[in-house]
Image (cartoon, grey):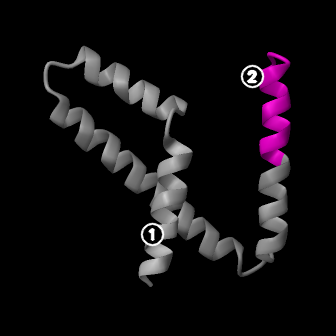
Amino acid sequence: MIKIIISTFLCVFIAELGDKTQLQTMMLAAKSSSVVPVFIGASLALIASSLLGVIAGTYITRYIPPYYIQNGAGMMFVIMGILILLGKI
């Protein structure tokens, strides 16, 4: 169980570094006179989105094999990357 916790932590932590959510949180902290509410809000948002992902992943894998979900997610990331490079997003 600890191995799953550590691998999940590392995956999420590395994926979130430097993304738009972290940059937005930095901007909110810079504009705020108190950083504690910004930290609490950002933490709760990450918890809520992670909970949604866990629930959705648990439900979806009952009907669709994880292999197809992983390949579909990979294709979506590639498509989004191409659209960003082309300035469409």
Q: Quadrant of the N terminus?
A: bottom left
What range is drawn magenta here? Answer: 76-89
Closer to the camera in the image, 11 or 34: 11
Q: Give the image quarter of residue 63.
A: bottom right
Number of numbered discs: 2
Residue drawn 60% across the image and 66% down it: 56
User: Is residue 87 a member of the stretch shown in magenta?
Assistant: yes
Residue drawn 32% across the image and 47% down it: 43
Pointer 2 residue: 89
Q: Amino acid at mark 1?
A: Ile
Where is residue 88? Give x, y as percent. 81, 19
Residue drawn 34% across the image and 40% down it: 42
Examine the residues drawn in magenta and state their main secondary structure: helix
Where is residue 59? Give x, y as percent. 64, 75
Residue 81 lies left or right of residue 51; in this view the side is: right
Q: Residues within 10 Å of mark 1 (few under 14, many from 20)?
A: few
Q: Amino acid at mark 2?
A: Ile
User: Which callout, 2 or 1, points to the residue nearer the camera?
Assistant: 1
Where is residue 68? Give x, y as percent. 85, 68
Up/down of 72 relative to 45, above or below: below
Residue drawn 51% across the image and 43% down it: 16
Q: CA distance from mark 2 to mark 1?
A: 33 Å
Element under label 1? helix
Element under label 2? loop
Report the disc number at residue 68.
none
Pointer 1 residue: 6
Residue 82 lies left or right of residue 8; in this view the side is: right
Closer to the camera in the image, 41 or 77: 77
User: Is residue 84 a member of the stretch shown in magenta?
Assistant: yes
Residue 5 lies left or right of residue 73; in this view the side is: left
Up/down of 59 relative to 23, above or below: below
